[in-house]
Image (cartoon, helix red, strand yellow):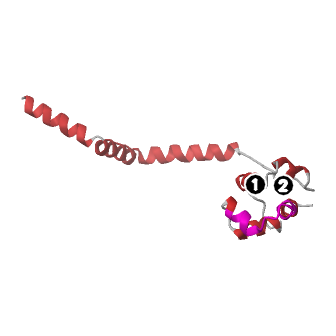
Amino acid sequence: MGLGTRLKEIRTSLNISQKELSEQTGLTPRTIQRIENNEVKPSLHSLKVIGDILKTDLTEFVNKSETKPYEFNLTIKITDMNQFINDLKTLIKNNWKIILLIVLVTLFISNYNEIKSGILDGWNSK
């Protein structure tokens, strides 16, 4: 039994319509339909919100489904990171004057009032 099928069983056993579940969770009715038809896997947030409304422990969804509902794969390629760092170094090396000018203008604009008052104080004290 899939995650959506199990969710639908729990919802119907509690006599909650898809529209009511939608209103209580903040998810759209179409999203509820797609989850129950196993067209999409809900996000962890959506699954938690639905579980809270149906007063069901999230592990129940995982344990009673035939397949694992969530599988995470995080792959970081060192060569990609090295290429990114080299590209960043090249960008800075080729455009350091423009970057410096942007930083200086930004600092000047963000501190304009302090600079103005400092200049006026210095001018008035002479």
35 vs 112: above or below: below
Q: Position of residue 109 (x, y in %)?
A: 29, 45
- Which residue is under mark 1? 47
Which of the image's four quarters has the C terminus? top left
Residue at mark 1 to residue at mark 2: CA–CA distance: 11 Å
Indicate the quadrant where residue 34 lies: bottom right
Which segment is the magenta one? 9-23
Q: Is residue 17 magenta?
A: yes
User: Which numbered disc, 1 or 2, marks the residue that appears first in the sequence?
Assistant: 1
Q: Position of residue 70 (x, y in %)?
A: 81, 52
Residue nearer the viewer, 34 or 21: 21
Q: Where is residue 39 in the image (x, y as percent from the top left)?
A: 80, 67
Indicate the quadrant where residue 113 lies: top left
Element carrying mark 2: loop
Judged by its main secondary structure, the magenta piece is helix
Q: Which amino acid does label 2 sit on?
A: Pro
Q: Which amino acid does label 1 sit on?
A: Leu
- Which residue is under mark 2? 69
Tell me if 51 is positioned left or right of 13 in this view.
left
Residue nearer the viewer, 2 or 8: 8
Q: Where is residue 76 in the image (x, y as percent from the top left)?
A: 71, 45
